[in-house]
Image: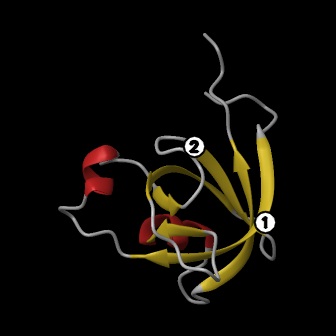
Amino acid sequence: MFADEPVSSQRATATWYEVPQNSLAKRRAPHEFTAAHDRLPIGSYVRVTDEKTERSVIVRVTDRGVGKKRTIDLCKEAAVAIGLVGAGVAKVRVDLLREREP
């Protein structure tokens, strides 16, 4: 589904938030893990890897509005998948992914 090499990578601080069921993010990607990021294009896919545990998840950027001290906000389900919920915040690597050509 995605090319082997990411388009770009960055170290970042991640947090999580509970996405309301009637939110635009849920309408944009109802069955996907989602995230908010201030600079990446809406609709882009990123792999978020916790630097401590090396657990990763692929999320779709569907929202804006992260704070000054963090770079990416993951939906709660994605945060659970990489073990971020208990800590609340983590240092992560964010890899912008490119879809494979058919």
Cα–Cα span, label 1 and label 2: 18 Å
Question: Residue 12 vs residue 43: left or right?
Answer: right
At x 59% / y 50%, what residue is drawn?
40
Q: Residues within 10 Å of mark 2 (few under 14, many from 20)?
A: many
Residue farthest along the left direction in this orientation: 22
Point out which mark residue 54 bears: 1
Looking at the rendered structure, the kind of residue marked 2 is Tyr
Residue 80 x, y percent position in the rendering: 52, 73
The residue indicated by pointer 2 is: 45
Q: Which of pointers 1 and 2 lies earlier in the amino acid sequence? A: 2
**Measuring 24% from the left and 61% from the top, which residue is drawn there?**
23
What residue do we see at 78% from left, 66% from top? 54
In the displayed structure, does residue 38 sit left or right of residue 6? Answer: left
Q: Residue, x 77% and y 73% (percent of image)?
A: 53
In the image, residue 21 above or below residue 29: below
- In the image, taking residue 83 as reference, residue 93 lies left or right, namely right
Residue 87 at what x, y percent from top left? 61, 89
For the residue labelled by badge 1, is the local secondary structure a helix, a strand or a loop? loop
The quarter of the picture where residue 38 lies is: bottom right
